[in-house]
Structures are given as structure tokens and as C-alpha cells.
Image (spheres, coloured by chain):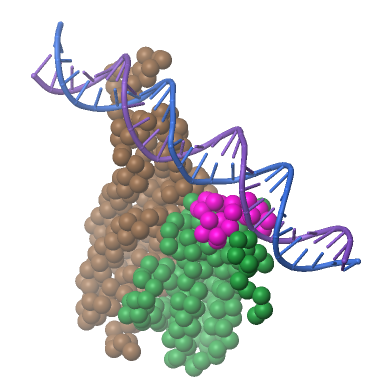
Chain colours: A brown, B green, C blue, D purple
Amino acid sequence: MSRETPARGRRPKRGRTRQALMDAALDLVAKKAPFSSLSLREVTKRAGVVPTAFYRHFPDMSALGLTLLDESFRTLRQMMREVRQQELPNERMIRGSMETFFTYVRNNRTHFLFVSKELYGGSATMRQAIRREIRLFVSELAMDMARFPFLVQVNAEDLQMMASLVVNSVVALTQEMLELDEDDEAGQQEMLILAEKQVRLIYFGVAQWRSEAGAPA
Amino acid sequence: MSRETPARGRRPKRGRTRQALMDAALDLVAKKAPFSSLSLREVTKRAGVVPTAFYRHFPDMSALGLTLLDESFRTLRQMMREVRQQELPNERMIRGSMETFFTYVRNNRTHFLFVSKELYGGSATMRQAIRREIRLFVSELAMDMARFPFLVQVNAEDLQMMASLVVNSVVALTQEMLELDEDDEAGQQEMLILAEKQVRLIYFGVAQWRSEAGAPA
DNA sequence: TTTTTCAGTCAACACATGTTCACAAATATT
DNA sequence: AATATTTGTGAACATGTGTTGACTGAAAAA
């Protein structure tokens, strides 16, 4: 922390411009339109930089988008790792996972908002990339579930089905939560409880599955 | 079916322009960008009409959007009615509902695509409107579920929770299906089966619910 | 220190956008 | 048949857009 305050008049902002552009875009997405309807000039203006400076860091807007996606994914994966490694007793497991997950969402609101909007509204490449990531998430969850004693004899396909059900539900609730006001504590808490209940309900169904519904139609 | 072929040179297209604009927008949304990044001129061009003609039918683009939303909702409600009124025996019920639902999705692809993209990517008013419609859907499903013999003693809140779980899951699968190619028969069928399985799984959980998980934490 | 590379500015362009206005054709009303 | 109203057209505007090129100060490498 040595030389700040860049001389007044010409401000160098020594390298942070790239990040400033990304943050600006994220901000705009969070409180305005989807990324696809963001203009280059809009982003640079918010970043406090002249339009042409953009090209020093990204060839075009879609490149910025992909970088943003990458940054968001890093957050997501880190969260996933944290959720998976905390081995809790069966009863507390669901609650614990949901808590750390939603905490992550709150602490990385703009990232999740960005991903949420791009999941269906973004370009084809974006949507594909996000879906791939989600599928990965589903597979890992399925692997974890395979270790449950009462699921040892469920085939891989059904495990995948169950995991995707859990993930889809949590994703939906996450998107609903993002719709809430940022500091609506009560609403957020309500969402957490709802999420826990729903996942628990699914696990009830899962526990029942092996016996009855073996063969597909 | 009297006077077609509009005289060549000046074409009258006697009133159909409004619908042409709506269809054009829907088309563009289906095979290109989200609605918010559509330009007025783009839409009019695709509708085969001069930009200024737009104002004869809508004050601005967002009005077009709301009209489109309304049109899509009519489709949705009609589908809902049809699903609800077919009282099938318990075993066939889930399968039957899913089949008519997904048939509707296929037959109104552009509408569902539009709604799907607007759900998270659209303007605040749009998102709210769609969410309201979904909540309505959830409430009706909860009412239907309340009549199940094994659910009579589940409280209203939990019924709502279960219904929202079902709806969220089906919505997610619908969006996944819309990502598929339009004439990927195999993929669509697969989605249908997956949907049925997931809903059935949820119902297993539901059947188990009443006994164990009464009180919230 | 000198030189090279990096990261910002400024001016300018060609083009797409939303919107206006006055006008004309098609249709509806009388 | 005469008139009024709706619906589409054309020209024109101010503004916002992506992108170019030449230039310049700051930081890094020599």
C-alpha cells in the first residue's frame, strides 16, 4: 500500500481497469438489464474510463461475458467444494449444506445474478457453459448420494435423476431468493427453511424409491 | 377468403400487421436474443413493415412485450385448465398430466421460449407478472393435492411447499427441453420420462411427509 | 539511463437506433 | 357517393453505438 492518489488530471489506475470493467458490467447486470443488452460504452462509462480503453483488455463484449462467467464459476466451484467436504451426520447434513450454499449466494450476489440471468437469456455459448457446470454439479452430488447406505442398489441413471431434482430445486429457489431485496433478512431466512424442507422431502422420496419404482415404463 | 394478393406495389395487409409484429418479435426471441435486446426497427423489418408503422399498434417496445406476455399467459392458463380437469386414476395421473403439459410446450414453443427467457432476464414488471402466474399455478396445484386422502392432515403451508417443489421441477425440465432441438424426438421423450420420474419421486416423499416431519426447526 | 512495452486519452467515422411529422392509401361510416 | 378514420409510407432528426487510428504518459526491461 504505497502510491495511491494518481496525480490528479491524468489518472493511471495502474492495472485495475480490467477489474473495474468487470465490476461495472456486473453492477449493471445486477441492477439493470441482462448482459446481452449492455453496451460497451455503457460499461466503460460506469468503469470511469474512455470507451476505447475497453479494447486494451477485451476484444469485444462477448469476451467480457465469458470472462465474467469464468470468474463466477470459480466462486461456484469453491462453494461446491466447501459444501461437499463438510461431512455432517445425516440429520444435520441437509441443513448444513443449504446454509453454506445460501451464505455463498448472499456473499456473491452479483455473480449469482449474472449467472441466473444468463442461464436462459444469454447467448448459446453462455447457456451451454452454464449447463455444463450444472451437470457437473449434479454428477458430483449423484456420486455422494451413491454412498448412502439405503441407495446402494439404485442404478446410476436414477441416481442422476434424483441429484438433478435436488439441484434444479435449489437453483429455482436461489433464483427466487435473488429476486428478493438484498437486505430482506426475513425473506432470505424463509427461503432457507423452504429449501431445507424441499430437499428433505425429496430425500424421503429417495428413501422410498428403491423398493417400488425400479423399472422404467 | 375473398381478396388476397394486395395489388402489388402498395400492400394493404388489412389489420394483420399487429399480429405480424407480435409474431416477428416471438420469432426473433426464439432464434436469437432475449426480448430486451430486440430493437424496434429489427422487429418491424422482420414483420415486413416500415419502422414508423409500429406506433400504430404499440406505444413502445415494452408494450409489445407485455402484450406478448399476455398472449403467452392465455396459452398457459388454457393448458392448466386442461391438465386439471382430466381426472385420472392415481396411477395414470402423473403420466397423463405430464404428457398433456409437454404436448402444450411443443405446440407453443415460441411462447414458452419467450416466457422462459423473460422469467429471469426480463424487466422487473415482466418477471413479477410471470412469477405471479406461477404462484397461481402453485396454489391451484396445492388445492388439488389437498384432496388426496393421504394429505388431508398436512397444513396449508406445507402443501404450498410441496406444490412449489413440483412446479419448480417441471419448469426447470421445461426450460431444459426448450434447449433441445425442435425435432429431437428422442430427447423430448427422454425429458418426459425424466419429468414423470421426478414428480413420482416427489409424491413418494409427500406420502411419507405427514408422519415424520411435522414441525419446522 | 535509455528503450520498449503497456495502458490510457482524444478525435473521428460509419452506421443503427427511437421518434417526429406530413402525407397517402385502404377501409369504415354516413 | 361523400366523408372520416384507420393504417401504412417516406424523409429527416438527434442521439447512441462499435471501432479505427494516431498520440502520450507510465511502468518494465534493457
Q: Is residue B39 magenta?
A: yes
Confirm whether residue B28 shows in the render: yes
Write the start and end of the magenta stretch as one range: B38-57
State the residue at coordinates (63%, 68%): B6
Q: Is residue A74 magenta?
A: no
Confirm whether residue B25 shows in the render: no
Residue at the far bottom in the pictured view: B89
Residue B151: x, y in percent? 51, 82
Quick check: B83 above or below C17? below
State the residue at coordinates (25%, 67%): A139
Out of B182 and A128, give the one closest to the viewer. Answer: B182
Q: Is A81 situated left or right of B75 in this image?
A: left
Out of D1 and A90, give the one closest to the viewer. Answer: D1
State the residue at coordinates (49%, 68%): B110
Residue A131: x, y in percent? 32, 61
Counting labels gives 0
- Please name the predominant secondary structure of the magenta segment in the image: helix
Out of A54 and B93, give the one closest to the viewer. Answer: A54
Q: Is C23 situated left or right of A213 in this image?
A: right
Residue A71: x, y in percent? 30, 46
Quarter in which the C terminus of chain A is drawn? bottom left
Quick check: A170 above or below A32? below
